[in-house]
Amino acid sequence: MSQVRDILKRDMKLFYDDFDSESNISDSSSDTILVSDFTEYNPLHNGHFHCMKTAKGMFPESLFVAIVPGLFERSGRGIPYILPREVRAEIAISVGADIVVEGPPMGIMGSGQYSLCLCKMFQALNTDYIPRGYKPVDGMDEILKRINMGHHIASKPYKIVDKTTHETLLKGKLEEDNYVITSFSNSLSKIGFDYKDKFVFVERIEGVSGTLIRESILKDNFDKVLGMMPPKTIEVLKREIENDGIIYGIRDEEAILDTANNYSVDELSSLNMFNEKLAGNIIANRPFDDLETLEKSILQGFSSHFKQRILSIMENPIPKKVISQYIDNYPSNIRILGYKDKKSLKKFKEKVRNEKISLYGWRRT
């Protein structure tokens, strides 16, 4: 608990440091090809490794940059990550990444908000190619083709549309990995980033189960998942288990209950993803002595993970107006979590279009 509390306290300071900073855009001039991947690496498994190897194989002289979600260590589902981002960066560097940078705070944002931040990071990094894993389903090939034609593809309620040609490409919903791709297309279009022929779509491999991996970590028994992760991932996981470095599922319960029990209806309503109805329901059922009781007072949202995301927001209570201004100025700083060597670091600094680059919490293998 103390480790998680320390991380959240540190990250709140970093958030407001970024909020008070202004991005310094540079006129970058570099022949380096930069391949930029966004992946949670929670933890880094063979699917991630396959995508990385495929992209590096296509552009062997490129600089491979991994964007790893940063502040507050909460996933897009609102659930605490397995390992802190510095450790996830360590694994990524050890298996082939050249640079790992800190990505946006996923756990306190809506999906559209962090998609927009990620796309602004791609732009700031002066990205040439973006590898993305996808799951082959009927109609997906046409969607991928349109995206690499530079068309503005967007997910609407129960359909995928080509906003460039005003066609409906697919009726129904996409699974998570495929949805992320269309979300990127929509966000990149909004910021005016030309992504024609920039995506490298990599078909997902079979035989990797996130559920089994998480169970193996909780049980400290990797017998069933030895073939699902690179040896380095398993080595680091075992090390972190031994050193009590696993943060999966651990929350600052005291901070959450303090927000739930003491914030006014206006203060709760001002938080990201909150409205007056949700705030009023929490206030009507307080005081709360534990998270289980609090969860029952959180109204059902638009996704199955909504309650966990609300817990993360109450754990790190930042007004939605502040989040909005933070996104407008994102990324005001680019923090490097890890790098392969000084040559890679020099090439990276020459490539990116932001003068504010810092080494923070990095571990070099």
Image (cartoon, helix red, strand yellow):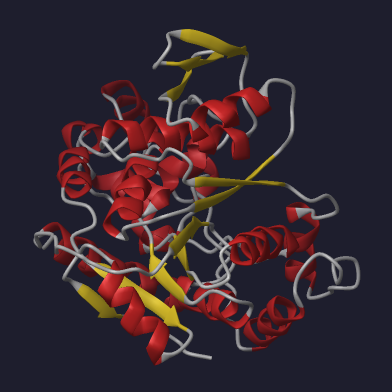
Compare residues 23 and 284 and report the one nearer the observer.
Answer: 23
Compare residues 114 and 191 and report the one nearer the observer.
Answer: 191
- Can you give x and y, in whole percent of width and height, for residue 347 in the image? 34, 78
147 versus 98 height, above or below: above
Compare residues 101 and 58 and report the one nearer the observer.
Answer: 58
Q: Residue furthest right?
A: 223
Q: Relative to 271, is 108 on the left or the right?
A: right
What's the residue at 56%, 64% (across, down)? 59
What's the residue at 62%, 26% (across, down)? 174
149 versus 98 height, above or below: above
348 versus 120 height, above or below: below
Give the quarter of the image for residue 39. bottom right
- Can you give x and y, in whole percent of width and height, for residue 91 in the image? 59, 78
Q: Relative to 204, is 323 on the left or the right?
A: left
Q: Relative to 331, is 6 on the left or the right?
A: right
Residue 251 visible in the snapshot: yes
What's the residue at 46%, 24% (across, down)? 153
Compare residues 276 and 83 and report the one nearer the observer.
Answer: 83
Q: Residue furthest front?
A: 31
What's the residue at 16%, 70% (across, down)? 355
- Can you give x and y, in whole percent of width and height, for residue 189 in the image? 33, 32
Residue 109 visible in the snapshot: no
Q: Relative to 344, is 268 on the left or the right?
A: left
- How many labels, in total? 0
268 versus 41 height, above or below: above
- Can you give x and y, in whole percent of width and height, for residue 243 in the image? 61, 88
